[in-house]
Amino acid sequence: MHIRTKRGWEIPESQATPEHIFLSRRAILGAGAGLIGAGMLPEAAFADTDPSAGLYPAKRNERYTLDRPMTPEASASSVNNYYEFGTNYDVGRAAAKLKTRPWTITIDGLVEKPMQVGIDDLLKAVTLEERLYRHRCVEAWSMAVPWTGFPMKALVDYAKPLGSAKYVRFETFLDRAVAPGQNGRFYPWPYVEAITMAEANNELAFMVTGIYGQPAPNQFGAPLRVALPWKYGFKSSKAVVKVSFVETRPKSFWEVVQGAEYGFWANVNPQVPHPRWSQATEKDIATGERRPTLLYNGYGEYVAGLYTGLEKEKLFM
Ligand SMILES: Nc1nc2c(c(=O)[nH]1)N[C@H]1C(S)=C(S)[C@@H](COP(=O)(O)O)O[C@H]1N2
Ligand SMILES: [Mo]
């Protein structure tokens, strides 16, 4: 993220080759079966092979509304940050190689009883809903998408943490054979992020399993990723395999890589610039329009209270 790379949304439409655009299930449904047979398309791209497909579309929770148009699926699918699969935004094809079933999530640390749970068993223990959320990347691009998932609080309750737990730590898979980016020595894989227990229990904190009314394509972090819409996007870990409840503040992936630029809190604030660029405005990945960035990405009424008494912390980087 600190390395300057070409931005997908800066490529003019006329130059965008089909390789830049993830083939959505809908677009390839007709021809899909034959292509899988010929080994040309990953099976995981198909909703009908996903055991959770019957849970979609989930009922929309109308409490969360947008102040801007929803980002079209094609735009959201062509600008993804997923360093395990490359530092460009067009990671769809590479990410499709990740096998998301079976998928086991380890829950450990300060909990009543450490456990492992398969994603489909976890899905039986929660209720999926759709939420329209804004997403603001620290690189100053943004989108607004319909996630499907369940409140993070439901995961916390499921895990039964002890009173001594102060932070929740999310760890992404580690598989160098499938994720080319993880072969680089420069980065401290696996991807790790963490938030406080109070943040995890906030109603906005969301565990994502789907997008656009279907199971999420891998590039969005299938089969389970985090969404924290008031924070910069890097806090929202993809493809989570371990959820740990801990007493001391974990160091996150980007903090280890570049602690002077990426901190623990990473709340969105237009008045606190990144050391190398302004955060005052953001570029809509679909329209290319610039709009003013909002404090807490516009979610202050839900989350500002989490930070009273913490004013001495670097809350906005
Ligand atoms: N495991 C993992 N999670 C990740 C990232 C990543 O590289 N690896 N990138 C983060 C960043 S910087 C952003 S902006 C969002 C992008 O989510 P999207 O591709 O679904 O838009 O994922 C976040 N989660
Ligand atoms: Mo990001």
Image (cartoon, rainbow, N blue to C red):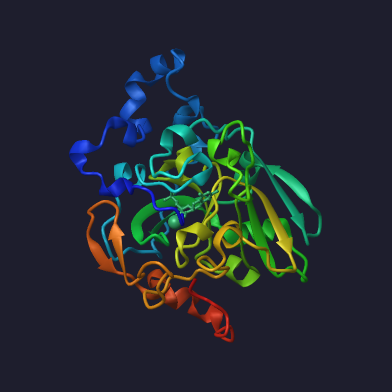
Residue 240 visible in the picture: yes
**Residue sitting at the far right:** 113
Q: Nearer the viewer, residue 216 or 234?
A: 234
Total numbered labels: 0
Q: Is residue 118 left or right of residue 44?
A: right
Q: Quadrant of ligand 2?
A: bottom left
* Residue 122, horizontal then vertical, whole percent: 64, 46
Q: Is residue 303 left or right of residue 167?
A: left
Q: Residue furthest left?
A: 14
Up-down relation of residue 168 to residue 128 (above or below): below
Give the residue drawn at x 43%, y 70%: 275
Position above or below: 111 against 263: above
**Nearer-the-camera pick, 9 or 210:** 9
Q: Is residue 51 above or below residue 286?
A: above
Residue at horizontal 50 percent and vertical 29 percent from the top: 44
Q: Whole-percent x and y of residue 206?
A: 52, 58
Tell which of 129 and 259 is nearer to you: 259
Relative to 81, say whether 112 is above or below: below
Task: Where is residue 154? Give x, y as percent.
Answer: 61, 58
- Which residue is located at x 32 percent, y 63 percent? 66
Horizontally, residue 204 falls left or right of residue 11, namely right
- Nearest the viewer among 196 and 17 is 17
Quadrant of the image occupied by residue 273: bottom left
The percent coordinates of residue 59 (x first, y second) are 43, 51
